[in-house]
Image (cartoon, grey):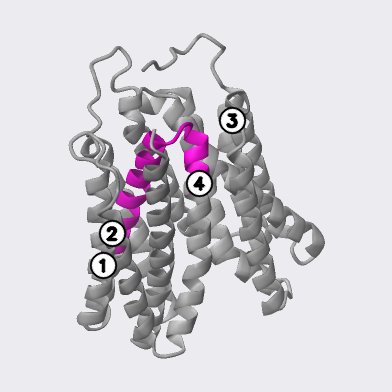
Amino acid sequence: MSDSGAGRIQVVTGVFAAALMTATLGLTFLALDAGLDIGMVALLAALSALVQLIARLPLGILLSRVTDRTVILVSVGALATAMIAALVLPGLVGLVLAQAMTGVSRAGFWSASQTHVVRLSRTAARGISGNMLMTGIGNALGPLVAGAAHAVSPTATAWAALALTLLTLLLATGLARLPVFRPERNPEAGRVAFRFGVVLASAAAFGAGIWHVCLTSLAPVVLAGGGWSEFAIGAAVAATNAAFLGGVVLSGRATARAIQLSVAGGGLLVGAGVAALAVATEVPVLAAVALLASGTGAGVLMTLGPALATESVLPEERGHALVVSGTYRAGALLGAPLLVSAATLALPVGAVMAMLGIVAGAPTALAWLLRPKPGSEREPTD
């Protein structure tokens, strides 16, 4: 284990997260500047989510052929390409290519960086906790950079994102050169996705994906419809993000025995928080408290879910396990907005949010209830 190597990937993760958040806002600014309406902006975001989902599918095999460092470098390069395309190519063509390349970048970087940090950390939970903490810091800094740059011009945000991406690329060249994962033949080969730890981690990733969509897209709309001021909405989202970081920090101290139960509990908190938005108008205090609780739960899911996946498989299969669970999150990022769009055609918004809360929280609880009996599932060995 290398503390310096783990520290380097944590720094790279934080800078990449800031670059990605700046890039996401920069592409939105460029789309609005090009005269696209909110519907087209949403479609472009959905395109990025779809490409991310597709790009994740071969990553398990890819990480057994090339080093995770190589995947990280290529993924950061994809984000740089996205920004160059958006700045150089005019209008919709550049934006479509940029969103597609952003999806590729997200898929490759998050899977490979988590694989990298787990291999360098004393425990998976501690490594992922540090990874998510740096991600949260980067996510907080990104909007500040984007806002300051946008005050100069719409394209300045994209240029700032490109600069941060190139800095990430430079830092990533110093990552540890770990050997390629080379899975050995064993009786469990090919069954990674069906091991309980990976199943529960996948359910956690799915719930966390729905929470992300809710916090960034749906919650502001629902709260505004409930009469909340823009200041109150911004404060609620900021406080929820702070609660997320709190959940990340707490997860880093979880014992091995508590991980599975903590993931199930985190899923329930996320589901309750999303569902409570159904009463944002009638009981705003309850909605606010539940939203904060959901942030803590999401921090637990995003930290202990990947840790659980990696601890449930052979060391050589950790990359595959992270890709499997991450694919469920990508699916939630794509599917949740489509589900909400379809459901609102027949149901009131409150009912839709209650339904979405159940969809977000039920999988982890169900997986926990259906867990195998102790000793019935073969434990991975080094």
Q: How far apart are marks 4 and 3 (CA)?
A: 16 Å
Outermost residue, bottom side: 152
Three-letter amino acid code at disc 2? Answer: Val
Mark 4: which secondary structure?
Answer: helix
Q: What residue is shown with label 3?
A: 259
Residue 75 position by quadrant: bottom left
Q: Distance between the residues labelled 1 and 3?
A: 37 Å
Three-letter amino acid code at disc 1? Answer: Ala
The relative height of residue 210 versus residue 265 in the rendered view (above or below) is below
The relative height of residue 335 versus residue 258 in the rendered view (above or below) is below
Pick whichever of labels 4 and 3 is earlier in the sequence: 4
Q: What residue is shown with label 2?
A: 76
Q: How far apart are marks 3 and 2 (CA)?
A: 31 Å
Pick whichever of labels 1 and 3 is earlier in the sequence: 1
Q: Do the residues labelled 1 and 2 touch (CB within 8 Å)?
A: yes
What range of the chain is rendered magenta? 101-130
Say the numbered circle drawn on residue 212: none
Three-letter amino acid code at disc 3? Answer: Ile
Asked whether 9 or 189 is in front, the reply is 9
Three-letter amino acid code at disc 4? Answer: Gly
Pick whichever of labels 3 and 2 is earlier in the sequence: 2
Viewer-side label of 4, 3: 4
